[in-house]
Image: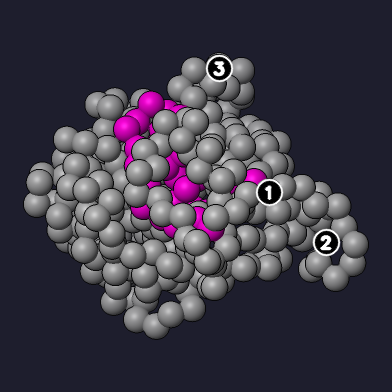
């Protein structure tokens, strides 16, 4: 039915090598790494072997080209990624604190990523996509939201499907009406990929079983629940279920785990793999990605993930 598409920000990330607080002292930095939650998702989707495309904007600069070249090299259709002549590619500086939380400096609001618009290239791409993956980062970008709202019914009208990764990160929720927008997306989603308390936020109630049932009643067909180091579970409205223990890894950089999990899961399911096989690959994709510094540097190919699973122990 056509590739999986995602819409949103593309940026570079520059990461502090040492943990600590803020950026006011001289510190060792490493990067620029290609980044942006939708870019990480679609990159992992393509690396897993799924047909993948992205709608986005980069600046006419090295930070833009490092992203374009990476996505293209690994098979992402970049025909609907525009190059803005007068807005730079966004950047994020990240420093992990001792306790695992992060300090950020975001240069995104005035960047090329905010210049997303519906162009003939976007129209042409959406007309041939079979699945749209929506990420909560659209709540922080009126431009991304507008394109997403327009694309969903077009893709659904041709028999396509939609997945939603709530990705409700506090630092991105700067615009109003997020709750209504989020609820409207949940109602349209075929597949939901929540982590943390997002399952409960989506359902509007606590209790995993209750929340899952409520979401199935609202039209969701499948839910893949991310549980960080504890692995993941998948449920289908038909009653099918799969569970996967966490792989034991050394966490070097947690950024991008959920995005890689989603990219692999959506790719595998669209390639026709079973719930259990898709979950195993997604679980491995998330775990492998946290072992490498840089938000998408650990995204594995199918062969790399098979190898990674074969030599990594699981939690009991
Ligand atoms: P998000 O980034 O969306 O909050 P998680 O942190 O739950 O998502 O990570 C997504 C998935 O990646 C997890 O469900 C798990 O499969 C894998 N994962 C993430 N962190 C780890 C870890 N420290 N050890 C093993 N697997 C991990």
Residue 253: give x, y in percent of width and height.
Answer: 67, 46
Q: Secondary structure at mark 2?
A: loop
Q: Label 2, label 3: how many angstroms apart (C-alpha)?
A: 34 Å
Left or right: 149 in relation to 111: left
Q: Residues within 10 Å of mark 1 (few under 14, many from 20)?
A: some
Q: Is residue 48 magenta?
A: yes
The label nearer to you, 2 versus 1, is: 1
Mark 3 residue element: helix
Residue shown at 68% from the left, 66% from the top: 104
Residue that badge 2 annotates: 20
Q: Foreground mark, 1 or 3? A: 1
Q: Residue 207 is drawn in which quadrant?
A: bottom left
Give 237 or 63, whichever is nearer the viewer: 63
Start-end of magenta stretch = 33-59
Q: Residue furthest right?
A: 26
The numbered dot on residue 32 is 1
Figure check: 64 above or below 260: below
Counting residues from the start of the chain, the first of labels 1 and 3 encountered is: 1
């Amino acid at each position: 039915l056509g590739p999986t598409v995602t819409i949103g920000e593309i940026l570079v990330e520059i990461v502090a090598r040492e943990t600590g607080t803020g950026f006011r002292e001289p510190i060792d930095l490493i990067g620029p790494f290609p980044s942006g939650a939708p870019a990480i998702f679609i990159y992992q989707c393509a690396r897993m072997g799924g047909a993948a495309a992205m709608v986005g904007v980069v600046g006419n600069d090295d930070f833009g080209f490092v992203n374009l070249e990476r996505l293209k090299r690994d098979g992402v259709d970049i025909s609907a990624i525009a190059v803005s002549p007068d807005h730079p590619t966004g950047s994020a500086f990240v420093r992990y604190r001792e306790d695992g939380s992060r300090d950020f400096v975001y240069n995104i609001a005035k960047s090329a990523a905010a210049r997303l618009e519906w162009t003939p290239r976007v129209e042409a791409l959406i007309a041939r996509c079979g699945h749209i993956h929506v990420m909560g980062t659209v709540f922080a970008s009126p431009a991304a939201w507008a394109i997403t709202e327009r694309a969903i019914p077009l893709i659904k009208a041709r028999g396509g499907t939609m997945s939603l990764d709530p990705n409700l990160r506090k630092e991105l929720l700067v615009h109003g009406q997020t709750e209504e927008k989020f609820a409207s997306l949940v109602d349209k989603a075929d597949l939901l990929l929540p982590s943390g308390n997002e399952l409960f936020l989506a359902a509007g109630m606590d209790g995993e079983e209750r929340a899952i049932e409520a979401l199935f009643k609202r039209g969701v067909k499948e839910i893949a629940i991310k549980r960080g180091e504890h692995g993941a579970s998948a449920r289908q409205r038909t009653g099918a279920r799969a569970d996967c223990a966490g792989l034991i890894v050394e966490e070097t950089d947690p950024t991008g785990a959920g995005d890689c999990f989603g990219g692999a899961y959506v790719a595998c399911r669209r390639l026709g793999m079973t719930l259990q096989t898709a979950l195993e690959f997604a679980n491995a994709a998330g775990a492998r990605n946290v072992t490498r510094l840089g938000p998408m540097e650990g995204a594995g190919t199918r062969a790399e993930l098979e190898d990674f699973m074969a030599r990594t122990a699981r939690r009991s």
